[in-house]
Image (cartoon, rainbow, N blue to C red):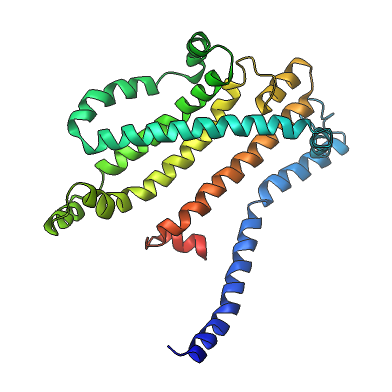
Amino acid sequence: MSAGEMSLTATIDRPRTARRNARRLRLALVGFVLPVGLGALWELAVHAGLSNGRLVPPPSVIFTTLWELARTGELWVHTKATVARVAAGFVLGVAAGTLFGALTGYSNFSRRILDPTLQALRSIPSIAWVPLFILWFGIFEESKVALIAVGVFFPVYLGVMEAILTVDRKIVEVGRAFRLSGPALVRRILLPAVLPSYIVSLRSGLGLGWMFVVAAELLGASEGLGFLLIDGQQLGKPAQIVAAIVAFAVIGKVTDWLIEISAAPLLRWQDAYGREAREA
């Protein structure tokens, strides 16, 4: 292809790309319709006197509280502490979940030995780990990170194991027919087949990490969004409680979106309906 043809192709594709990006932006904004609409209705209900808004503050009060927390720097201190804990727990949980999931998925012997015990541990409520982790690690950061890692571990472990077990036998046999074995079979066949489910398990694990951090910050924390929740409850500040919940929702959505866009280039090979609908 000559330089002129390449330039012409780029010129033709540029408006098409701009239209596609504009459409994606419009579709993304549609997601704000429900929360904004519900918030506006509640604001109107409070102003109309249908509720005093004391236990469930209207959006104007919540955003005023968030603004004050941000202005004083308190919001950033608590957000930084919570994000650091979730990040550390997420890394540990993903590493352990991926390792054990791959081991039990690839090896029948390992699955028979490990999976029954891990499935039993998966049924234990998160709060049940709190006293044990306090005894082991004290009320310091280690106990909080360990609790978050437990929450992240199980969806990643289960997702990886099930993804490997459900790989189409035919594509594995095709790989072996081409004399792929060991690392080559994993890299060329198993990894691409497992990757979509793995990304989903990462997103599920991250969601549980954000849930477990609240329980973790009950362990004597003096900083964190979970601390803001407890502080608001003890001092009778519903606006602070809801403001912390909003902060959790926003940060959780942003981190989930980061995983989604980071994984998108790795999944371009998929010819799936969901991908087409997402890019429409």
Give the left or right position of residue 213, taking residue 190 as reference: right
Give the left or right position of residue 275, taking residue 59 as reference: left
The residue under the point 54% across, 79% down is: 13
The residue under the point 42% across, 88% down is: 1
The residue under the point 45% across, 41% down is: 202
Q: Nearer the viewer, residue 219 or 4?
A: 4
Residue 4 location (% of width, % of height): 51, 91
Is residue 210 visible to the viewer in this orientation of the structure? Answer: no
Give the left or right position of residue 260, taking residue 36 as reference: left
Give the left or right position of residue 51, taking residue 32 as reference: right
Is residue 91 visible to the viewer in this orientation of the structure? Answer: yes
Residue 117 location (% of width, % of height): 30, 20
> Could you tell me how many numbered marks the image carries?
0
Q: In which quarter of the view is residue 224 placed? A: top right
Residue 252 location (% of width, % of height): 60, 39
Residue 95 location (% of width, % of height): 41, 35
Q: Residue furthest top?
A: 135
- Figure check: 251 above or below 127: below
The residue under the point 84% across, 37% down is: 71
Q: In which quarter of the view is residue 267 placed? A: bottom left
Q: Nearer the viewer, residue 30 or 108?
A: 108
